[in-house]
Amino acid sequence: MKPIKFDLPEKVLEREKGSTIAPKLHFQRFEMKYVIPTEMVDAVREYIRSFMEKDPSLAPRASTYDVHSLYFDSPLFYYFSQKMDGVRKRKKIRLRVYRTGPDFSPNAFFEIKRKNDVVVLKDRFIFEPKRLPGFLETLEIESLFAGPLPDLELAEEYREERMLRSIQPVSLNVYTREPLLGRFNKNIRVTFDSNIRTTGSDSLFYEGQDFVSVSPGFTVMEVKFTGSLPFYIVDAIRRFSLSATSYSKYCQGMIAYGKILPHTPLIYNHS
């Protein structure tokens, strides 16, 4: 079976967390999402196991970690509306930190993720969590750093979005991620995101009890790659009758939490 070929420069995929691997700050890749029943995850994982391995960015003896994402939007929810209205070229701005067990990672990330259909461009920089309260108070990007900004273009893009849309933190999403990396082809990464939950807090490290479950009973399988989509992923998609979907944890979280009423139906895989 011929692999599906995409025309992007070859780049190693994201490795999101680890004590021995430096975090990647710039990404250019393809992403496809599949919302599958959680009871199907074991079968899909087993089907591709011979070609995948535990992501080496994971902490020793860990198979998962939690992702905490604090999303920004305008008072009229500009980014939410773009996504739900099917705008092909769009972006999201968020803060992100990772957690294994009770321990948060020592660094947090400021990210701007741009998407054009299945093509993703993501840039981010690292900041110390201790600087977060000052940033949330002023929303001035300079408050995240004691010295010069590490990425002037990224900072300027944030300033423009803030000036045009008055963006601010609107929701916190948390989920558990199981990452797999290609055993032979390191340009393919598959993640299974489960136990997705959201709250209206504007704190990246919030641990309250008012989280609301998002898409209960389902897991989001994300396929991230550059170059060709390997044959074993194509086989798995066909074997389990998976259909790619434009799923947004942020948007579905906003709906689940009751901040916004849904106006676009979401279709899950039930095969």
Image (spheres, rainbow, N blue to C red):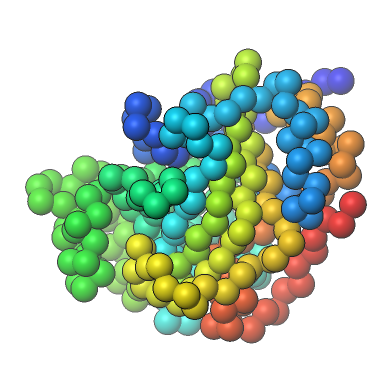
Q: Nearer the viewer, residue 222 or 150?
A: 222
Q: What percent of the width, then of the height, locates residue 182? A: 62, 24
Q: Is residue 98 left or right of residue 240?
A: left
Q: Nearer the viewer, residue 93 or 38?
A: 38
- Asked which quadrant contains residue 252, the reply is bottom right
Q: Residue placed at 10% from the left, 51% from the top?
A: 146
Q: What percent of the width, then of the height, locates residue 3? A: 77, 23
Q: Residue placed at 42% from the left, 81% from the top?
A: 75
Q: Nearer the viewer, residue 175 or 31?
A: 175
- Asked which quadrant contains residue 175, the reply is bottom right
Q: Is residue 156 left or right of residue 248?
A: left
Figure check: 94 above or below 16? below
Q: Nearer the viewer, residue 102 or 83?
A: 102
Q: Residue placed at 64% from the left, 45% from the top?
A: 192
User: Is residue 72 something one can see in this rendering?
Assistant: no
User: Is residue 47 something one can see in this rendering?
Assistant: yes
